[in-house]
Image (spheres, rainbow, N blue to C red):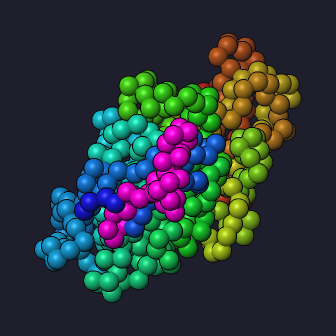
Amino acid sequence: MEPRVQQGTMTWTLGVLCLLIAASCALEVCYDELGCFEDLPPWGGTAQRPAAILPWSPQEVGTRFLLFTQKNRYYQEIKPDQSIQASNYGGRRKTRFVIPGLVVTDDEDWPQEMCKVMVKQENVNCIAVEWKKGARTQYAQAANNARVVGAQVASMLSFLMGRYKQTADKFHIIGHGVGAHAAGEAGSRTPGLARITGLDPAEPYFQDTDAAVRLDAGDASFVDAIHTDALPFSSGLGLGMSRPVGPPSELDAIWQGDSRFDACNHARAYLYYEESLVQPRGFVGFPCSDSKAFAAGQCFSCPDGSCPLMGHHADKSAGTDGVSKTKYFLNTGRTAPFSRYSFRVSLTLDGPSWPNPGFMYVALAGQYGTTQEHQLHVGTLVPGRTYDMLLDAELDVGRVEEVRFRWNNHILNPMRPRYGASRVALQRGSDQETWFCGMETVVENAVQAVPPC
């Protein structure tokens, strides 16, 4: 398909005049069924998007749609034409699109891996959207090429709905980085789209822009976002948006891989999402005003069981109907597996009448195993005092059957004191507190098993 470049609504005389005075002229490019794209504000020439750049043609962007289902081990490339009859696409199944953004070195095919995991967990059509050609360029150009990608996804959606008599509420688009905004473009063109998930939506050229430019809450019936790299780009450290939903040369170097950039935080968003497919209970979000209050343990409870699940199962959580501006926080592991299972632990200490310096640890044993030991306290051990902590277990133990307590002080103490947990209150998310009662004290480094009261 050939592009048609026009001078917008300007007359030929004005076009010549703007060339003579070295001013910028509005341009527009049109691509058959995708429609037209212009470089006027809000798409270009603004404080957030200073460069006025038109997107490349679909041929130059090179978008491909790679289908995964439970019937095919490897992908089948599909196109919006008669050839789709030879594929395993199922019109009665839900369909999820996965759109990447930054081409991550050594992990550029992660959308395909996510689709493989997804079809093992549920009987859906998973379509990995590949647009490597359009992404391997300067960042501002790639950000505008994403407009064409979004339009192509919307065109594919329209084709599938027409051919298989599907409705928009059977489709979900997952986009990472710049791909999150491509998902927003597709959603804005598809009324009634069920869901869009933004995985660390990109900041440069999108933050604080008009809603038409970026992923917005109005782009689907349910829009959720995972923010893992919210430091501002001007700091040189962040690439993700610092709000819910640097120099250009430096940005281009990062985008094209010529500059050293720790993409770990930015890439973790899709790793979290992929793991949430198989470990949904390990990503419970807690409502909180800000990250500091959450870190201080002030936001653990889930009123009325309203804590949602982050990631794939977020739309199945209570309280996700309607528009909510609540922020949710959770802790994750430093390395895979990232899922964590949060408990509030309140332990009342028993022991001698005099205080001693020392360390206290607890572990939780349940129907599916036992967690690692987690440090409860460092400092003076005071019998009768209650010690609190938020414990992020690395293992889903199921129903907790026993709390295990240990203490030490790493020095020889001729008094050979004995300490124990006389009472432990344990709360998990929206569950009621469970009480455990200890009937003994133990010597240093011995483990006390504390059963339910």
Image height check: is 413 above or below 438?
Answer: above
Quadrant housing the C terminus:
bottom right
| Residue 415, image x, y percentages | 75, 18
Residue 128 spot, x, y in % from top left: 31, 58
Q: Is residue 81 left or right of residue 230?
A: left
Q: Quadrant of the N terminus?
A: bottom left
Residue located 38% across and 33% down the image: 256
Residue 410 lies, with reference to residue 185, above or below; the image says above
Q: Which one is nearer the viewer's eye here, 251 or 98?
A: 251
Q: Which residues are magenta?
A: 5-34
Whether residue 158 is in magenta: the answer is: no
Give me the residue at 34% from left, 81% from top.
161
* Extreme residue in the left direction: 86
Q: Residue at x 41, y 59 (%)?
A: 6
Q: How many marks?
A: 0
Q: Position of residue 440 (x, y in %)?
A: 70, 41
Q: Is residue 107 visible?
A: yes
Left or right of 65 in this view: 322: right
Give 427 or 402, whichever is nearer the viewer: 427
Q: Is residue 299 left or right of residue 134?
A: right
**Location of residue 434 in the rendering, given as x and y in whole percent from the top left corner:** 69, 59
Relative height, residue 290 to residue 196 (above, below): above
Let me know if residue 280 appears in the view: no
Q: Picture quarter containing residue 63?
A: bottom left
Residue in the foreground of this view, choosing between 144 and 363: 144
Q: Please, is residue 121 above or below residue 89 in the view?
A: above
Seen at 86% across and 29% down, the residue is 353
Residue at the far front: name it: 13
Q: Is residue 53 left or right of residue 288?
A: left
Q: Say if the magenta span includes residue 25.
A: yes
